Image (cartoon, rainbow, N blue to C red):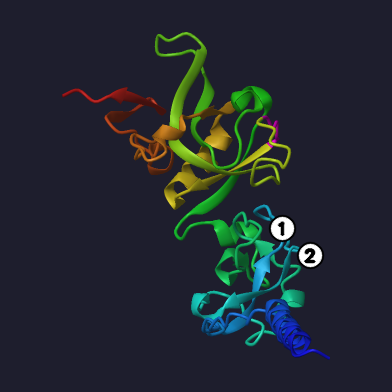
Amino acid sequence: MPASRWVILSVAAVAAAGAGYVAKKMMAPLPQEIVAAAPSAPALPLTDVLVLTGDVPMGQPLFENIGWERWPEAGVNDGFITKSAEPDAAEKLKSTIARVALYKGEPVRKTKLVGDGVSFMSSILPSGRRAVATQIAADTSAGGFILPNDFVDVIMTRRRAAGNGQAEGFITETILKNIKVLAIDQAIQEDEEGRRVKVGETATLELTPQQAEIITVAQQMADRLTLALRSITDAQEVPRDEADYLVTGQRRGTVRMIKFGAVSEEGARK
């Protein structure tokens, strides 16, 4: 074979080998980029807390509206009920009554529940106050628009006998002012359907001991007791000039006159 042909074959072989090497390099996968892993956040310690799984109206039992939920330990305070401290609390508290309205998602607190053996009304009554019931009707309770937590004036109407130059008639006066209504019949809050009218037969009022005595005497004297609904903006007003003469026996600014065995009251002269 001529020498020129050997040269051509050698060059062709070298070219083929070089082409193969280049092709192999082009087909090789690119090296993967190494990404440093971010440091993981430390896990927060969790604990089971008893929470409301549904809304509970004031005065109603909790029933099935409570359950355990995982909470960060740092967000748990002494008022919460934890599974580690009271593992059977979810079952024991089902029949407990809510002292105030409770809402889904909030932790259960015993301060908002009525304790065993304690009546609901006595648990919501402020210290030093008395709950006194009085008979009402639609025409003596603002047409039935008075609801629990409203504030009212109590008006007494009684018949006046003829005598001392006065004709027979009626005497009307406000004997108690700015009194909170605790309940109408057995309802202690607005109904679940949001109706703003409730015609009841008995209103339970929150009174001081003196006011309780006044309304007790008034119920014996009066032909009718009427509840007058007050504006909510007057709730902080301090009541004055109540009919404490009904229990003390003497009206402010009056003089009791006894003449021929008859008792009467006249305005005091300055």
Q: Is residue 87 left or right of residue 179?
A: right
Q: Quadrant of residue 106?
A: bottom right
**Residue name at image x 70 percent, y 35 percent:** 201
Q: Percent position (x, y) of residue 60?
A: 71, 56
Dot 2 falls on a residue whose secondary structure is loop
Q: Amino acid at mark 2?
A: Glu
Which residue is painted at 58% across and 60% down in the image? Answer: 122
Query: Camera-side residue: 203 or 234?
Result: 234
Which tag, 1 or 2, sits closer to the chain's start? 1
Above or below for 113 versus 163 = below
Amino acid type at mark 1:
Gly
Is residue 39 found left or right of 134 in the rendered image? left
Residue on which the image places disc 1 = 54
Residue 266 image position (x, y, % from top left): 31, 23
What kind of element bears circle 1? loop
Residue beneath disc 2: 64
